[in-house]
Amino acid sequence: MRFIMRACPMEDSPMNQHELNNARPYFRELEAKEREACVNAIPKVRLAEKHMRNCELLLNRAKLLAKLPRWAITAELGVDHAAFSEEILRVAQPQTLHLIDLWNTDRYHDGLFEGTKAKFASAISAGQVRIHRQNSIQAAADFHDDYFDWIYVDTDHSYETTARELRSYAAKVKQDGIIAGHDYTMGNWVSSYRYGVIEALHEFCVEENWEFVYLTMDPFESQSFAIRRIL
Ligand SMILES: C[S@@+](CC[C@H](N)C(=O)[O-])C[C@H]1O[C@@H](n2cnc3c(N)ncnc32)[C@H](O)[C@@H]1O
């Protein structure tokens, strides 16, 4: 659900500055209505005390990574140029790190896939890193239940995708395992893109009885989260 800022509504009949100034409030109102409809379409579920009582606030996602179990079986959903994947390898020293990404857009392209393969060539040969060029939700079927110690979710941040990822991977994570991820935030101000991570997570925690363990307070990038089952 993307919103495109429109300076001029009809390119074949350009407005003069006066007309444009008069039209701006109308288009702002239209855009506000579109944004409101988008927000209203995302389900809102309230957390209860039990979903937050064991949640620790951390300074940033580097601190979160340091808290996640080492020598674990892990996955990163959404890899980009593998900058965070490198951090996962360096800090968490996972037994296995599955990197799952489509790399199929102009921004997230084939070159990033090739770069990721090259970056981790020796870890791939050693079997520590495995690359899955796949849709995150379809890739879940490749793993058996109770497989992961933890995963980190960072794909398109929409409500729909996040809700499906949480449900697809819940059974794949061990009983005491963790689902962590990025972008626990309302959206991207620069691109006017409304995320749905907060809503998808809250709904999932309430419906599936999971709790927040960590939330980060990153000042210069989106917040990260970590949740686990209430046992
Ligand atoms: C924000 S970037 C990931 C950033 C990375 N985790 C980091 O912290 O450096 C999002 C990535 O998710 C991938 N992606 C988006 N939707 C996806 C999906 N449904 N399945 C798999 N990958 C997806 C994109 O190709 C892109 O590389």
Image (cartoon, rainbow, N blue to C red):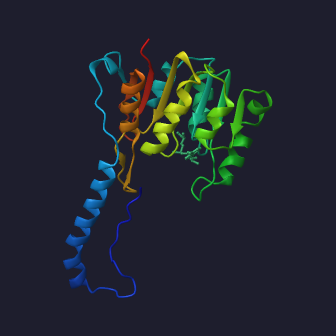
In the image, is residue 108 above or below residue 157?
Answer: below
* Image location (x, y in percent) of residue 207: 39, 26
Q: Residue furthest right?
A: 125
Quarter the C terminus occupies:
top left
Q: Quadrant of residue 98?
A: top right
Q: Nearer the viewer, residue 217 or 176?
A: 176
Q: Quadrant of residue 104?
A: bottom right
Quarter the N terminus occupies:
bottom left
On the picture, is 122 further left or further right than 178? Answer: right
Q: Nearer the viewer, residue 226 or 39?
A: 39
On the picture, is 18 further left or further right than 35? Answer: left
Q: Quadrant of residue 25?
A: bottom left
Give me the residue at 63% from left, 17% from top.
71
* Image location (x, y in percent) of residue 230: 42, 15
On the picture, is 85 further left or further right than 125? Answer: left
- Asked whether the viewer can see residue 184, the reply is no
In the image, is residue 187 above or below residue 90?
Answer: below
Q: Nearer the viewer, residue 230 or 87?
A: 230
In the image, is residue 71 above or below residue 7?
Answer: above
Q: Residue furthest top?
A: 231
Give me the residue at 26% from left, 60% from top.
33
* Image location (x, y in percent) of residue 21: 21, 78
Query: How many dots with numbers?
Result: 0
Q: Nearer the viewer, residue 19 or 45?
A: 45
Give me the residue at 49% from left, 43% from top.
161
